[in-house]
Image (tube, helix red, strand yellow):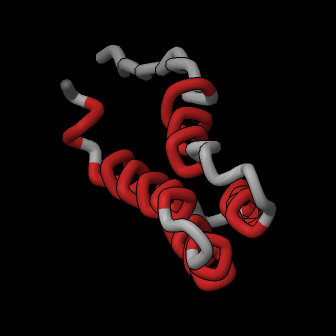
Amino acid sequence: MKLFRDKIFVKGLVYDLAGMATVAIPLVGPFLDLLWAPYAAKKMSEMYPGRKGKLASVLVFLEEILPGTDIIPTFTLMYLYTHVWMKEPLRAQVIEVESY
């Protein structure tokens, strides 16, 4: 699949899986979220610069820090929003031709 060749998509999947892995560790998992949440927010803002990236980094921080929300694949959803759902439509291109 073409999607798995995209480095941003694969990095997002890895970050989502790492964030979800903390749920599987009993007793220690919630404390790991305290370390993972700021790191994930920083990585989100690096992967998606600009206003959308800042908003997404706040959302991923909240998603990782709040209990019970670790299963939301925030990085994957941001990739889909940026590269699939909000893809700019093709614009008509005007080519000027000079006649002699």
Query: On the picture, is 50 further left or further right than 93?
Result: right
Q: Measuring from the top left, give residue 56's x and y in whole percent.
A: 71, 57
Vertical position of residue 6 compared to residue 39: above or below: above
Tell how many labels.
0
Q: Name the image quarter holding residue 18.
A: bottom left
Query: Which residue is depicted at the point 68% across and 81% down?
Result: 34
Q: Nearer the viewer, residue 66 or 78?
A: 66
Quarter containing the C terminus:
top left
Q: Residue at x 42, y 53 (%)?
A: 17
| Rendering quarter of residue 42 | bottom right
Percent position of residue 98, x then y: 37, 21
| The N terminus, quarter of image | top left
Q: Residue at 34% x, 15% y: name it.
A: 99
Which residue occupies 57% across, 44% down?
73
Where residue 81 appears, as percent x and y from the top left, is: 61, 35
Q: Nearer the viewer, residue 19 or 42?
A: 19
In the depicted view, which residue is nearer to us: 21 or 17?
Answer: 21
